[in-house]
Amino acid sequence: YYFRSSKTSAPHNQLLKLAAMMAKETKVGAVKDIGLTFNAAPAVGGVAAKTFSASWASAKVAGTWNGSSWTIAFDGTTHKDAANGSLLTPKTVVLQFVDRKATKFGDKFGGKTPLLKSVGSGRAIILRNGQSFESTWSRPLETSGTKFAYKGIQFPFDVGQVMIVLVDGTLKKAPITVQ
């Protein structure tokens, strides 16, 4: 189901034949509520935000507000649909700060695969309608959805694509910028 493309370099050249994989999958269940709420009415009360970036040791994601959604780039390359070349532009982006722990897993080059803890609660920055909202997230159980709140009230995302970026919350200075 996985293959490498000669059109791009690693690590961005590993692709998935999703239709072939899903045709063989027998345990696909009904869609479950993951805790998010949506509302097309524009959000108010945030701080103006035109760009954001989040970095890890070997990767970077960045976004630019285009007036209606976020244009996303991975490692400097604009994110596009592989099938038709259209831009993948989420209406809402969340920078979710989570605990990161080392694991015994890694690759042959010494890179380590971290464990990101998405059960619990913490800080989040929600980017919507060209604004940044300093927020919190909460997911009390592994089986429950994640709720995002701004000023103590559940925050509705814009109708459309949502991108949630897990950020290492264990660092004293998180490798993110929002401007």
Image: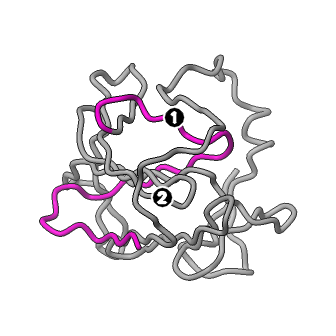
Is residue 87 depicted above or below 143 in this figure? below
Q: Is residue 104 left or right of residue 108?
A: left
Near-viewer residue (86 or 132) = 132
Specify which label sits upstream in the sequence, 1 or 2. Answer: 2
Question: Residue 171: x percent and y percent?
Answer: 16, 63
SS category of the residue bearing label 2: strand
Q: Is residue 16 left or right of residue 110?
A: right
Question: Residue 95: x percent and y percent?
Answer: 39, 54
Question: Residue 40: x percent and y percent?
Answer: 66, 37
Residue at image coords 51%, 71%: 50
Near-viewer residue (77 or 90) = 90
Q: Quadrant of residue 39?
A: top right
* Residue at which label 2 appears: 131
* Residue at which label 1 appears: 156
Specify start and end residues of the magenta stretch as a single range: 151-179
Mark 1 near mark 2, Cβ–Cβ under 8 Å? no
Is residue 76 part of the magenta span, yes or no? no
Is residue 144 depicted above or below 87 in this figure? above
